[in-house]
Amino acid sequence: MNLQPQVITIKNSKGLEAEISNLGASLLSLKVLDKENNPINVVVGLEKPVAYFGQEYLNNYNCLGASVGRWAGRISGGKFEIEGEEYPLYNEDGVHLHGGKEGFSKKYWKMEKVTKSSVTLSYFSVDLEEGYPGNLKVTVHYELTENNALKIVYKATTDKTTPVNLTNHSYFNLEGYGSVLDHELELKSNKYVELNEKLLVTGNFIETQKTSYDFSNKSIIGKIGFTGLDDVFVLNDDPSYKAVLSSSKTGIEMKVHTNQPTLVVYTPIQLPDLPYKNKANFTKYAAICFEAEAYPDAPNQSDFPSALLKPNETYRNETVFEFLVK
């Protein structure tokens, strides 16, 4: 199927407005009204839609707003095994990242349904694409709800047992420029997954209390000892929300809700030099990602909950970014 670049704008009645590209089923922008009723683009996006940039850009764009799969995050050893059969994966120095050499974030998805406030896209991943078994049918549904939230729902079905772990890779900054170091962050998590020098899991869990990873109470991101985050937080069983990000400057508060067990929280030290929307100037620690997903490296970690999808099952990842103004 020869798909062409498409960009769709959706809105709700509360002032939320989002742009979605069919390349990588990506969130290009998300405008939220601040305490002065000014629209603020709270996700890092480009002046031109992602779909119109070349391969060099795609190799260096850090998955801005993209839908990542078939496996978001890292798989160790460049392979995994299912029912005694080994499946080799594309890897660099034994690390398979974000679905492989291309992954879903660099594929054109099909626009299935568009309404004023929502859009549904689909992608068909063939058996052994990037090494994964099974023909996988995937959809993502973006919706701007009337309680002022962006709802993202991934679904998938397969004809062979396969690992599935999808997520959205948006970078948030509630001021639209600069840094998130002065933002406040709260995480409903008491432990994180230990990582080695390759950012692969060791299998150990560490309590966050009395460490620089402790955001159990709302605190400034750039607190003493902050050296950036690229870490996996195990989420508490709390029905209220899983994370809160807020800016006193704009008055915007974002609550994160998800049905996933972990949240990868990522604050890149520096974003690549690209033409960002509104000619925004981003500085050190410009944005923060909340990647809601399965336990990392689950295909190779027998002690972790399984992330295998079997025929006649439906994978579902639902994440909601709810916005309030204070």
Image (tube, rainbow, N blue to C red):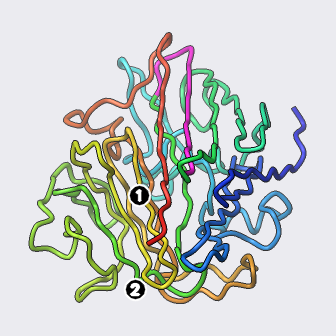
In this rendered view, identify the residue nearer to me: 175 or 205. Answer: 175
Return the disc, 2 or 1, that comes first in the chain's sequence: 2
The magenta segment is 149-162
Label number found at residue 182: 2
Residue at position x 52%, y 74% from top? Answer: 174
In this rendered view, identify the residue nearer to me: 142 or 195. Answer: 142
Label number found at residue 255: 1
> Seen from this angle, which residue lies furthest top?
312
Q: Quadrant of the N terminus?
A: top right
Tag 2's secondary structure?
loop
Q: Nearer the viewer, mark 2 or mark 1?
A: 1
Residue 141 drawn at (x, y percent): 63, 37
Residue 73 drawn at (x, y percent): 44, 51
Residue 186 drawn at (x, y percent): 29, 66
- Work out whether 147 lies above or below 279: above
Left or right: 218 as drawn, with respect to 256: left
Question: In the image, what residue type sits under mark 1?
Answer: Lys
Residue at position x 49%, y 42% from top? Answer: 71
Tag 1's secondary structure?
strand
- In magenta stretch: residue 160: yes
Label 2 CA crowd tier, 10 Å (few <14, some 14–19, many 20+): some
Question: In the image, what residue type sits under mark 2?
Answer: Asp
- Work out whether 282 lies above or below 73: below
